[in-house]
Amino acid sequence: MQTPERAGPPLWLLAELTYSCPLQCPYCSNPLDMADHKTELTTEEWIKVLRDARKMGATQLGFSGGEPLVRKDLEILIAEARSLGYYTNLITSGVGMDEARVKAFREAGLDHIQVSFQASSEELNNFLCGSDSFQHKLEMARQVKAQGYPMVLNFVLHRHNIDDVAAILELSKALEADYVELATTQYYGWAKHNQNNLMPTREQVKSAEAIAHQYQKDLEGQMRILYVVPDYFEDRPKPCMNGWGSIFLTIAPDGTALPCHSARIIPGLELPNVKQQSVDWIWHESPDFKKFRGFEWMKEPCRSCDEKEKDFGGCRCQALMLTGDASNTDPVCDKSPQHDALLAQVAEIEAQQVTEQPLVFRNMRESKKLSRQTN
Ligand code: FES
């Protein structure tokens, strides 16, 4: 059993290179106050993070954002990661990439590229991301494949596109995708803010799942399809981050080290920064990374639960957002005393199929506005 004193290495390093992004998806998991975190690590500072984490045993490295393509030094960081022996993954919208850049990534040694789409139709895709990017995305998906990468596509599902799962999978088939991730929106950051306008009904979720399963059967051996059910509709929580401070280390654009992408919302955390502390100290010594590591912090019903080593009590950020206390059991779990309240909340959102509140798109202007409202 893992204890706070004896953590294994941060096997999975997520480098959020920037919060800048040419798109404005209303379900982005970036923090609502991203405009208040303007500074970004320099190339040299990122290289130091990559070296230090690798020395500690990190093996998987994700480049994300915002849109990581915004960083002009991405090729340099990829080459460094390659020389250090990481398995590297670029998580991108494809906007900011062209044929030459895909080739440059290949030459620098990037292992894997995941291209995200917002929808299967040009109109909805462009509406959701606030940019006429659909045709370019199609072209970039083809370029990724042409450079010898597996084609990995990601679609975030919500009320506005979940009924199009068959069309999404047909598009993926036409593009000869090797792997498709259908991930129903998780409610963090901008998605939480827009939750009432994004959450699908239980009926929509069930029907999308059935279609996805049929395609999984029909396309076995040809295209792998991963369908991620939204955990609000489950009765056991997801093992978020595989346990706090267990294998995932996220570095935010300004160098803040986070046990998960959303940890800034948890009150009382000081959140160390790689500019002031070594990655080693942050991982092994910082109180924030120890706070929910292992099982000692758990209250009932998690503490005596025989499933705690499977789900680690669920998600700390979700527990905070839904119960006001990050150390409570994630209310997705039906053993949580707050589970019924979550079901009632979901039913209420489900009932309002047309919300009067418009989608708030993720951009720096809205972020500044929201910050002004909360300060
Ligand atoms: Fe923070 Fe799950 S997102 S612990």
Image (tube, rainbow, N blue to C red):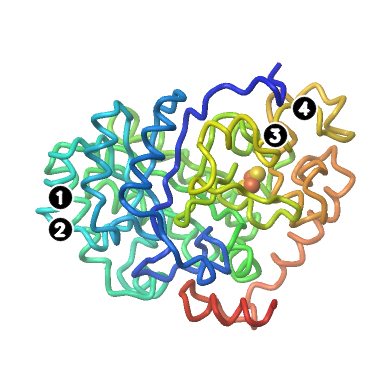
Give the residue at mark 2.
98
Nearer the viewer's eye, disc 1 or disc 2?
A: 2
Give the residue at mark 1.
143
- Alpha carbon distance from label 1 to label 2: 8 Å
Q: Nearer the viewer, residue 126 or 352?
A: 126
The answer to whether residue 235 is left or right of residue 212 is right
Nearer the viewer's eye, disc 3 or disc 2?
A: 3
Q: Nearer the viewer, residue 306 or 219?
A: 306
Residue 295: mark: 4
Residue lying farthest top? Answer: 1
Residue at the (74%, 40%) spot, across then down: 235
Proximity of marks 1 and 2: CB atoms separated by less than 8 Å:
yes
- Alpha carbon distance from label 4 to label 1: 46 Å
Residue at the (72%, 69%) spot, across then down: 351
Residue 9 placement (x, y as % from top left): 52, 24
Say which element carries label 3.
Answer: helix
